[in-house]
């Protein structure tokens, strides 16, 4: 059976579309309906589900820039990363806090983290202590990406000369998509036309733009291991971070002035509301994006976000942003309003910090101390 795909612009919107059904699962019927009628709904941004492309082979996920970058505030297309605070609080240990794991084990881990963050051992966490911790955890994500990149680079550099051309990468990419690697290589060598479907070609065109952007001057049309890291993880390169910011503004900017207003930032994409629950999700999505725009991204509070402001907001190693994030995280659980986090508070709001809800948090404080 042949299925006609929606236009490329619609597909880009659909990539950012997430539908919540009962128990937070993805409603397959609703998704199919979206594909058929081209309706877009607001993304509920389940980052955990986006970490790897569904149905993609391991090789494909390894050689393509990931949709989700740990420790970065915005996803592709400007979607807020709802797991950001957990990623910068847990670092590489994030996966250990599973929803269905043993609460007692998670409680002990969280207490252990609290003790590490509390450098001066006064049994409370200050904004500066949390800022230092966030920077450390962000660096962990950087180190993990660097280590994984060594393996990924080998996958696209079969001759081991330490450099990869766009054609070499393109062959490996198309092979990961199910194309015959030898046939593709032969056609590229003979400069013959490749018969590629529209969707794959669109992805390939986007990757080509990113590829040549990662090629540090003087451009030689080849990527070494460090440049390949910037290709897969733009957060590792200031130049690539700028490129990512341009992509986000391109996707959100409606009047073409290369700046963002709050209305442009909260209008991605128009929600389809069928019931009150969906309306509540839609309203919460708008409120969250408006708050982030007005209180965090728009640094000078003039109602306009420039490329420079968005770049500073996106930079994972920006110490001022880390301090601001630390204050926000503390404010969420600071019930006694003393601008510090105590163990009882962080255990009570464990789901916010770890994604894992712990019971009997008060009792656990007395057991440990």
Image (tube, helix red, strand yellow):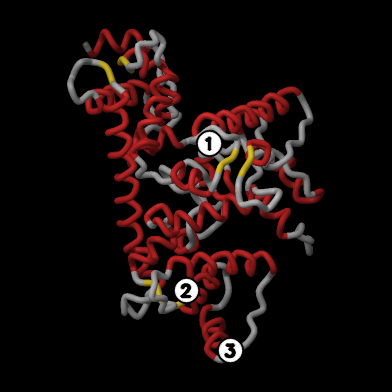
Q: Nearer the viewer, residue 117 or 298?
A: 298
N-terminal-most mark, 3 or 2 = 2
* SS under mark 3: loop
Left or right, 211 with respect to 304, comes to left
Q: Which residue is mark 3?
A: 191
Q: Which mark is residue 169?
A: 2
Residue furthest to the right: 37
Q: CA distance from mark 3 to mark 2?
A: 16 Å
Q: Nearer the viewer, residue 188 or 212?
A: 212
Q: Is residue 206 above or below residue 235?
A: below
Q: Which residue is mark 1?
A: 298
Q: Indicate the position of residue 369 as horizontal and vertical percent values.
A: 21, 11
Left or right, 221 with respect to 3, comes to left
Q: Indicate the position of residue 14 as horizontal and vertical percent values.
A: 68, 49
Q: Nearer the viewer, residue 68 or 133?
A: 133
Badge 2 crowding class, 10 Å Cα cut-off, few under 14, some 14 to 19, many 20 or more, is: many
């Amino acid at each position: 059976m042949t299925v006609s795909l929606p236009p490329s612009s619609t597909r880009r919107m659909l990539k950012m579309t997430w539908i919540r059904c009962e128990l937070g699962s993805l409603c397959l019927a609703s998704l199919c309906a979206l594909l058929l009628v081209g309706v877009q709904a607001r993304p509920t941004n389940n980052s955990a589900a986006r970490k790897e492309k569904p149905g993609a082979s391991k090789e494909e996920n390894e050689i393509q820039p990931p949709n989700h970058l740990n420790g970065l505030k915005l996803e592709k297309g400007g979607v807020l990363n709802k797991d950001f605070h957990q990623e910068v609080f847990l670092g590489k240990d994030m996966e250990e806090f599973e929803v269905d794991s043993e609460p007692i084990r998670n409680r002990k881990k969280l207490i252990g983290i609290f003790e590490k963050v509390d450098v001066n051992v006064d049994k409370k966490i200050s904004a500066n202590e949390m800022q230092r911790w966030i920077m450390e955890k962000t660096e962990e994500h950087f180190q993990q990406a660097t280590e994984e990149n060594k393996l990924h680079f080998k996958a696209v550099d079969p001759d081991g000369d330490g450099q990869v051309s766009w054609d070499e990468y393109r062959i490996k990419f198309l092979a990961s998509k199910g194309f015959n690697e030898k046939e593709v290589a032969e056609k590229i060598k003979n400069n013959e036309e490749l018969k590629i479907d529209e969707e794959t070609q669109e992805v390939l065109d986007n990757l080509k733009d990113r590829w040549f952007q990662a090629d540090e001057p003087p451009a030689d049309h080849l990527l070494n291991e460090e440049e390949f890291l910037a290709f897969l993880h733009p957060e590792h390169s200031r130049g690539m971070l700028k490129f990512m910011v341009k992509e986000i503004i391109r996707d959100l900017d409606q009047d073409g002035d290369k700046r963002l207003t709050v209305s442009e930032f909260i209008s991605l994409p128009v929600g389809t509301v069928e019931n009150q629950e969906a309306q509540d999700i839609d309203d919460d999505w708008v409120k969250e994006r408006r708050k982030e725009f007005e209180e965090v991204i728009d640094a000078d509070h003039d109602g306009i976000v420039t490329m420079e402001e968005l770049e500073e907001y996106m930079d994972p190693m920006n110490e001022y942003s880390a301090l601001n994030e630390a204050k926000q995280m503390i404010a969420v659980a600071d019930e006694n309003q003393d601008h510090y986090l105590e163990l009882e508070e962080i255990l009570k709001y464990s789901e916010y910090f770890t994604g894992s809800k712990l019971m009997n948090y008060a009792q656990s404080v007395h057991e440990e101390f």
